[in-house]
Image (tube, coloured by chain):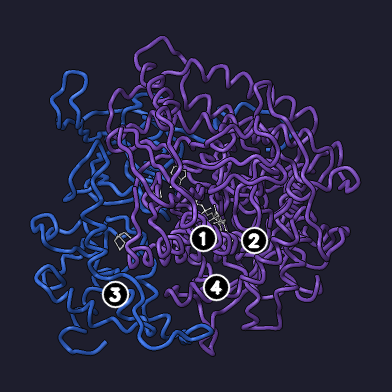
Chain colours: A purple, B blue
Amino acid sequence: MTEHEYDVVIVGAGGAGMRAALESSQRARTAVLTKLYPTRSHTGAAQGGMAAALANVEDDNAEWHTFDTIKGGDYLVDQDAAEILCNEAIDAVLDLEKMGLPFNRTTAGKVDQRRFGGHTRNHGEAAVRRACYAADRTGHMILQTLYQQCIKQNVEFYNEFYVLDMILDGDPQTAADGEEISVAGVVAYELSTGQIHTFRAKSVVFATGGAGKVFKTTSNAHTLTGDGMGIALRAGLPLEDMEFFQFHPTGLAGLGILLSEAARGEGGILRNSEGERFMERYAPTIKDLAPRDMVARAMANEVREGRGAGPNKDYVLLDLTHLEPKHIDEKLPDITEFARTYLGVEPYTEPVPVFPTAHYAMGGIPTNVNAEVLRNNTDVVKGLYAAGECACVSVHGANRLGTNSLLDINVFGKRAGIAAAEYALTATAPELPADAPAFVTALVAKLRETVGGEGTERVAQIRKELQETMDMNVQVFRTEESLAEAAALVTQLKERYTSIAIHDRGQRFNTDLLEAVELGFLLELAEVVIAGAAGRKESRGGHYREDFPTRDDENYLHHTMAYARPDGIDLQWKPVVITKYQPMERKY
Amino acid sequence: MTATAEKTDSTSEVGAVPTFTVTLRILRHDPEGLDGREAGAEYWEEFTVEAFATDRVLDALHTIKWEQDGSLAFRRSCAHGVCGSDAMRINAKNRLACKTLLKDLNPSRPITVEPIKGLPVEKDLIVDMEPFFASYREIMPFLMTTGPTPERERLQSPEERARFDDTTKCIMCAACTTACPVFWTDGQYFGPQAIVGAHRFIFDSRDEGEWDRLEVLNDKAGVWKCRTAFNCTEACPRGIEVTKAISEVKKALTSGEV
Ligand SMILES: Cc1cc2nc3c(=O)[nH]c(=O)nc-3n(C[C@H](O)[C@H](O)[C@H](O)COP(=O)(O)OP(=O)(O)OC[C@H]3O[C@@H](n4cnc5c(N)ncnc54)[C@H](O)[C@@H]3O)c2cc1C
Ligand code: SF4
Ligand code: FES
């Protein structure tokens, strides 16, 4: 056991974590703990772009962007947060450019911009060019640029450190409203040695990314197992809006690897087996560039009604064949390469098989606009922050618009870094209780004991069954029955999880052990997703209930706050912040 | 799949796709000396798995880890060639396991899998990447400018942007550096990736630190060690013309112009 002490500890070195680190490390003694080398983070997989109303190529402004974000989120967006997101977007892009990010350029030398789903001119008149981009490697460039700046600033990284617990100085579930609870640090497992480390810190920022691996077909990395969300839930904190998961329309069929919406932004068209441009029926104005949840459902519906393509009629086609090969090479080089490498399809001449893929968690650890973590509808945990995909501020509401997440991680990553450092400079160092590492020590010891023991269950098998039931029952179409079925299976899987056996008895690089830990998070998060989806008897954004197919503002225009209690998931509501924009029907 | 779709057992679903049997011959490294081995023992071990036509080497490694031997250690994350975690030597060539399809490797013969060469092996296919990242840090891989920061973006024409496009694609997988015979034998050499990283800034019209970097690369550990073996270019999973980038840096040093 090794003990460390910092002013600020940041958990995660993706876009949100490194953006926070750049701010925090200038102001306070900061450490970044990350289970992956920073440049392996999944921000690097982001393709299409980052939204900001720079108006470099056509008329645009932050207010239009705000409106689109709120409408795109099916009015579950906190409007104060969306205003901040869109107002600060312009500086967020300019900051990155000044750090050296190689954006694509207009002929005048400015940052170029392109169209993306749901981003419109003047409240829905037509698609607008708002996404700043670097070919289809925007996330890669953001991750690289932030990492380069971290090198420049000598940011201190603890690479391949898995944070598995957070330490609070009280129990958020038994504390009275208004009572002060603070963070005291985190406990981490070092991959290379198997050692456990405690980090005492005045401020802790969670930036651990998404949880796509609760599903089988996903654009998310193997490592996106929702650790930060799971840690918060176990610490007694609520998770917000977890039933809202985005299924991106264009995953490579059968594989889930993403083909950016930029493919449609650049002119790509979705077709069914009859060659029909079916989006004309579902969203007559902006067609293929309708928000993701609508396009994903439309695709699933085409397949359901027998108009799917391929031998099993189980996907639709993304047609780029009418685009100039040169244009494709310039604007969409990577994703067309994915189609060639993984499906053997040549996008110049053949349409690409696609089907919705689990992509983005709109929900997460609830925060206010200063990235402070909420422990109920109003009280924050002092010194505890969250930003990026693991957090829910909520700027994405029920459905995130494309290019708004790379924006989110920059805007709220920066805010979290500043707030965490400023708080740390005024706060006194918390006491870390002597038993701080107890939970992690016990968790690791218990898993080690399973090696060669009685356990008969395999981690990979349980994970597979979990992911399959989630794809089958909790994907773009949900019903009371499908959710009940998933819930029952997850309960069984959790039970079976108690008799798993791992196989690696070693201390060093024991990824076998860590996969078991990660599965623990996935099972608990799946439970929250299912409970939230069952509790929300309406359809809104990414959450679609066939038994309640319309939005019900009267009963459900509020956020879900899910708490893990001894007897299961407890769902509470939190009001949506509405400033200027009254909910309207979402039509495109 | 959807709630109402017909429920099929996933094995029968993929059962329609032809499968084949493939053997992986993996160079293992046991740092701790478990199961009666000596600490640091190296040994070859063969595993046989069933695979589908779309499966990559990474899928086969997962099948082994998940169904046969959980102690097999390797890094991976994105599984589609963008994070740089899983460069390894596959049939004696450096490649990303997640981007190499089994069917393209002649699966009728055992496929050999080894850690990348020239970096200390930690366990099985995992190597210590720190020396590699240290070389990258040496070349000051960040934009250097002088003068006041402009209010809006710095302007750059599409042509200027194109000048260094190729080297912006690097995912730091180390496939190039660990394919380089000079790197294997000369512990001092920065290796191709560091030069690629420097190239990305040297030829960026906004950057003013090119001569600081060129000075580092002119050093004894720098570009002149390169013997133009082209291994790096062949190894690069991002299709970066590594040797060309190195020769452009050499040319800048001899001509004094970038
Ligand atoms: C294929 C793809 C394409 C996308 N394209 C776009 C796009 O074009 N535009 C857009 O706006 N959005 C896009 N998104 C969404 C966006 O990329 C992500 O939401 C965003 O990058 C998440 O950033 P993050 O910093 O929150 O998390 P990540 O980048 O995922 O980073 C998470 C970090 O947390 C660390 N971590 C996790 N668990 C632990 C733990 N237990 N202990 C220590 N460290 C831990 C990891 O090591 C990692 O460093 C895309 C997403 C995908 C999957
Ligand atoms: S240049 Fe290519 S091979 Fe070398 S580290 Fe970068 S991506 Fe990998
Ligand atoms: S796993 Fe990311 S490059 Fe292979």
Chain at tag 4: A
Q: Which residue is mark 4?
A: A93
Amino acid at the residue labelled 1: Ile
- How many angstroms separate mark 3 from mark 1 (CA)? 25 Å
Residue B209 higher or lower than A267, as above or below: below
Residue A24, image x, y percentages = 45, 60
Q: Which residue is mark 1?
A: A335
- How many angstroms separate mark 2 from mark 4 (CA)? 16 Å
Q: Which residue is mark 3?
A: B199
Chain at tag 2: A
Chain at tag 3: B
Q: Quadrant of the N terminus of chain A?
A: top left
- Under circle 2, the secondary element is loop
Q: What crowding class fits label 3: few (fewer than 14 Cα within 10 Å), some (14-19), or many (20 or more)?
A: many
- Under circle 4, the secondary element is helix
Q: Are marks 3 and 1 in contact (CB under 8 Å)?
A: no
In the image, A265 versus A84, the foreground residue is A84
Residue A585, image x, y percentages = 88, 58
The response on whether ligand 1 sits within 8 Å of label 1 is no
Q: Which residue is mark 2?
A: A402
> In the displayed image of the protein, which residue is found farthest to the top?
A454
- How many angstroms separate mark 1 from mark 4 (CA)? 23 Å
- Under circle 3, the secondary element is helix
> How many marks on residues?
4
Chain at tag 1: A
Whichever of labels 2 and 4 marks the residue nearer the N terminus, that label is 4
